[in-house]
Amino acid sequence: MTQIPDSGQRVKFYQTGTFTAGNRLLDAAQRSVQASVERANSLDSGHRACQGCGEALGARYVVDGALRATDNKLIAANATGCLEVFTTPYPESAWRLPWIHSLFGNAPAIGSGIAAALRAKGREDVRVIAQGGDGGTTDIGLGCLSGMFDRNDDVLYVCYNNQAYMNTGVQRSSQTPPAARTATTPVAGAEPGSPPGTGKSVPLIAMAHGIVYVATASVHDLHDLEYKVTRAMGFRGARYLEVFVPCPLGWGSKPADTIKLARLATQCGMFPLFEAEHGELTAATKIRQRVPVEDYLKLQRRFDHVFKPENAHQLDTLRGIAERNVRRFGLLAAEDAS
Amino acid sequence: MLQQIEGSAAVAETVATCRPEVIAAYPITPQTHIVEGLGDMVKRGLIGNCQFLNVESEFGAMSVCIGASAAGARAYTATSSQGMLFMMEAVYNASGMGLPIVMTVGNRAIGPPLNIWNDWSDSMAARDAAWIQLFVEDNQQAADVHVQAFRLAEAVSLPVMVCMDGFILTHAYTRVDLPEQADVDRFLPSFQPRQALDPAVPITMGAMVGPEAFAEVRFLAHYKQLEALDLIPQHAAEFREVFGRDSGGLLKSFEAEDKKTVVVTMGSVIGTLKSVLADMRDGGASIGALTIRSYRPFPREQLRAALAGADRVIVFEKSLAVGIGGILAADVRVALANPAIPVYSVIGGLGGRPITGENLRRMLEKGERDELEEPHFHDLNVEVVRRELERLREIGRPGASAENILRDIGVVSASKAF
């Protein structure tokens, strides 16, 4: 392979005008795991995810990255949910690593048990990830997740956040943003969609446990995602990674817009990208080109109603969330903030 | 080694000799002393490289055991009562996945009304969960049966519950001949699972199974339980060879042979019952007892054979299927297939109500005269119940009765029941 010399220049992908994160612009060492012919391809083709599924893309990059970081010595525990169902309809399995599904709410504890078994057997070279959707992680699985954090078990937990229970037919979860339409928060009444003032930030809850590493990532920036997975696997102890994964089915968006929506969510401030160690914020990805929240919302039918004049206050609520994220995590570069 | 030791401590000491690799612990009365004991031994490095996890809930405890067992480690936990209900989804998961986890159940009632004392409501709630359930009568059995439980679980690839009466056994200081490490090592080989989570052989465990194969998976669990019916006596015989004492087995006769009346029960109540029956026999009664040691699998054939000569059977149990009656009694009736002889269902000892020699004898004599109603509630305060039912009829609104019952019997004073 031709070695591309390090230009020493800070690569600005937006130079191309397309936001394309092209591997050819990077040093060989920085290139995506997926660009290597030796990539694990942990989540194989032939699974049953929907077209444009952000979770399938995110999971493949996360697990491939973790496999590379552990020299392919990795075991995965998976919560019940889309990722579990579309990858393992008996007798088929799309996984090319040891993988276990137990229940909806116990993937973190399954991970803890596997890690304990490996420790007991002196096999600490084998590492563990546990993963699930936002419902399995932040609602029904939060008790086990908190316990895993609290004990500092050597598990990387990955939450693929698509902001609702998609596998069961798009019901509201604690990650559903205010105003979003779901099957259990219909467009009706004075506050159509999910109620204002609800929801929680599990990355911040994870940070409150003081665990060694917490990060958020998004499927529009797979280099950043791989970097965070690699970084996470460099630590021992409990770690948490939340990956933003748009869901065309649940959001009423075009499958072709999945990456675009993920990017817009971060560029409008609705989904901040950051890293934290031992409970302290260590890095936040600056917004490159700030976009109005409306640009993100208008591509999703779940937010159609917020553009009606009588629901203008809902649009303000969502703008407020983005604005507070921008301030809280310092998402604007100094020159942009002015 | 003979010791005067608390039941929980005897279990902890014995589990330690079984070389567990992962122990998940959550405190719940009356199980707590067992995991305290094990935690202490792990921390002192007395159980090899065993990992002891202080988990956030019983659901977490069983889930940690599932993960550990799937990764090829010998896993153990203990629970009781509400804790068992809280872990129930994972209880079913462990057996469905064929994971040979061993769990001690310090049997305790399920509230409300909140009650920490002994009965069998907790493990009975899991009787259909495909776990093997072994009941023990005293703390020697409790210790010995744990050693057999690991062997059995790993032989049939199903989890095993060792059910011991809370407080009556867990907190009783009695003489126990603790299994020696060398003997346990002779009896119990190391855990070698057929498959485990291992990067060298990447397998998928816990895949979704549809109607085309689910029934077969459930049948196999049933089949493995029936296999255990053969293995349990074999293991008990091998245990006798190694340890020189009788422990375990499917059921145990206490002079039940050729008796007109046979009491069938489980667990520690046989201690009181034995002396009552001896007294009654001294008075000329033809009466004996059988304890069922393997509740799941249920030894139908063996029980039928053991009861073949009886004129009547009185099933005494600390469990109630509300809306129909005795749980163990129903199983005994199934075992007798077409009982030409009466099988009486007696429910007693719920929530720790004392079972005394005197009240047992009164009930048994009524049984001998074929005067027991169906089901018979042992030592029930009929007057208190009658008064509360009258109050409920007057008021005609839904609500709890526990406080009214306490007022009625004078445990708490209050101006008015409502």
Image (tube, coloured by chain):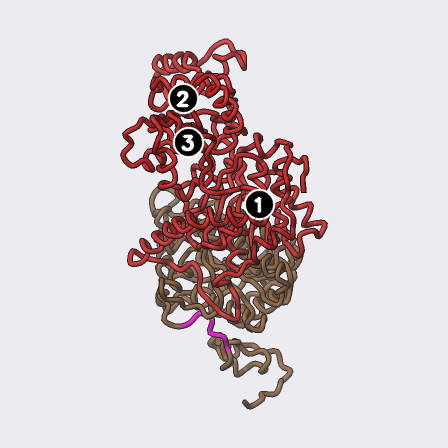
Residue B56: mark in rendering:
1
Residue A207, position in %: x, y? 62, 53
Which-is-in-front pick, marks 1 and 2?
A: 2
- Chain B display color: red
Q: Does the magenta stretch mainly form a helix, a strand or a loop?
A: loop
- Look at label 2 and name its amino acid: Phe
Separation (CA) of disc 1 from disc 2: 38 Å
Disc 3 target residue: B257
Magenta span of residues: A39-44
Q: Secondary structure at mark 3?
A: loop
**Residue A187, percent across and down?**
34, 47
Left or right of residue B209, residue B418 in this image: right
Residue B403 appears anywhere in the view: no
The mark lying in front, picked from 2 and 3, is 3
Q: Earlier in the sequence, mark 1 or mark 2?
A: 1
> What chain is tagged by disc 1?
B
